[in-house]
Amino acid sequence: MKKLEHIGIAVEDLETAERIFGDVLGSPSYKREEVLGEAVLTSFFQAGESKVELLVPTSPDSAIARHLEKRGPGLHHIAFLVDDLESELDRLRGLGYRVVVEPKKGADGKRIAFLHPGDTGKVLVELCAEAAPQG
């Protein structure tokens, strides 16, 4: 694990959440990005070496929409940056951790995967790595 990459927060109203976190962090969101495969619109804030990612669903059947319906707005996941996503997943599987989302394209130029929260103290843990350059 290289560092805490970001904290993901599920929100119902992106504009309101952007205003709040802009106020709290002292600077506006530096980027919005839609992740079609997840049916989510994200908004990123820099917070020192880490980031805050706000997530709002773009479809009523997305994972974030289901999260909001079941748990309401708030912490969704914590993400750690790794050098080699597949090697980290192999290492963690060897220790008995279950992977609930296999590696795929995520927001902010990352490849992502998620560990089962039942294995990680009821916290959804995302592992992310820089995506290989296109070209």
Image (cartoon, helix red, strand yellow):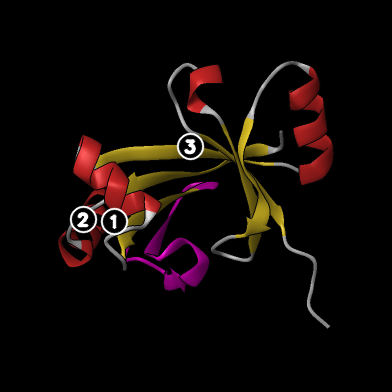
Q: Secondary structure at mark 3?
A: strand
Instruction: Identify which residue is drawn at 73% across, 63% down.
Output: 131
Instruction: Identify which residue is drawn at 44% across, 38% down.
Output: 77
The location of residue 98, given as percent across then percent down, is 64, 27
What residue would you read off at disc 1?
26
Per the model, the C-alpha gap separating discs 2 and 1 is: 5 Å
Of labels 1 and 3, the one closer to you:
3
Asked if labels 1 and 2 touch by Cβ distance under 8 angstroms, the answer is: yes
Taking 20 as reference, is 130 left or right?
A: right
Instruction: Identify which residue is drawn at 78% across, 34% down.
Output: 88
Q: Residues within 10 Å of mark 2 (few under 14, many from 20)?
A: few
Name the amino acid type tagged 3. Ile
Q: Quadrant of residue 69?
A: top left
Per the model, the C-alpha gap separating discs 1 and 3 is: 22 Å
What residue would you read off at disc 3?
78
Q: Quadrant of residue 113?
A: top right
Taking 73 as reference, is 123 left or right?
A: right
Q: Which residues are magenta?
A: 26-50
Q: Looking at the picture, tell me which residue is in the foreground, 133 or 28.
A: 133
The location of residue 4, given as percent across then percent down, is 57, 38
Taking 80 as reference, is 92 left or right?
A: right
Name the amino acid type tagged 1. Gly
- Relative to 32, residue 81 above or below: above
